[in-house]
Image (spheres, rainbow, N blue to C red):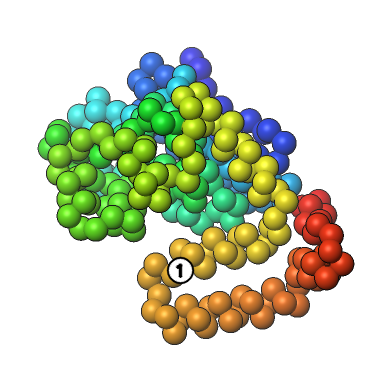
Amino acid sequence: MDDPAIIERHGPVLKIINNNPSARNALTVGYVAALMEGLDRARDDTSISAVVLAGASGFFCAGGDLNVLIERREMEVEARIASINVLHDAIKAIRACPKPVIAAVEGGAAGAGASIALACDLVVAARDAYFAVSYLRVGLTPDGGATAFLSEFAPRQLVNEILMFGDKVPAERLFQLGVVNRLTDAGSAEQEAQALGERLYQCAPKAVAVAKSLAQDARQNDLATQLDLEAQQMARAQGGDEAAEGISAFLEKRSADFTRFRK
């Protein structure tokens, strides 16, 4: 049996590939476990600048396996919640990872697959790819953070349309809404995601991690709280080695070398 996920290192980028192509990369317990393992590895390895999530054979992820969900009908509610929280822990890990996580979406990202893609810090998608949140069509309700992520960028009426009808939303439309960062030709999403990850290798790693955290905190904090957080982080940064290198490089009219902080 093939591995449920393929974890590869490409220069400074760690790639985690959902490897269940016969089911359009529907989620498996093995894949979620490998995703968590890869995120832990990225967190602890200073030489890794970014994590890329992709799917095998040209399809990102079809979401949950309905055959598995049928089996869960026999479980108690608390047991069902526990199984759902396995996915939710992975979503939280994507958001908590200090390295940027980049989704490379080919084909489609449906259900929990869409949630995983939208949980990422950057999204690259092929022009012919789509996103779909079709839970209601089979009598289910959204999970994986779908309602939270959709509400981050869309007004309530559009969120309702996406949730209630479950239609395929073209990557082009999400690009226009600012959710997809880069559109590529079909088959090129992973290549573009790799390029973004390599660019991040040239950035100050601690500053990137803090910026990611601040951007997430800003969604829930009032202005005064967020200003306090920014002041604390800026004060720490001003006394750090990354700022010493960056400011010196600017004044000396040269490119900053942050790669030495990744050794």
The structure residue drawn at horizontal position 19% and vertical position 38%, both measured from the top left corner, is: 166
Corner quadrant of residue 11: top right
* Residue hosting label 1: 217
Q: Name the foreground residue: 70 vs 219.
A: 219
The structure residue drawn at horizontal position 59% and vertical position 56%, both measured from the top left corner, is: 98
Q: Is residue 187 above or below residue 198?
A: above
Residue 29 picture location, percent across and down: 41, 33
Q: Name the foreground residue: 204 vs 22.
A: 204
Q: Is residue 148 visible?
A: no
Q: Name the foreground residue: 10 vs 106.
A: 106
Number of residues whose C-alpha sits closer than 10 Å to that of mark 1, classed few (under 14), some (14–19) or many (20 or more): some
Q: Is 17 situated left or right of 236 in this image?
A: left
Q: Is residue 97 visible?
A: yes
Residue 196 picture location, percent across and down: 61, 43
Q: Name the foreground residue: 132 vs 18.
A: 132
The structure residue drawn at horizontal position 21% and vertical position 35%, both measured from the top left corner, is: 167
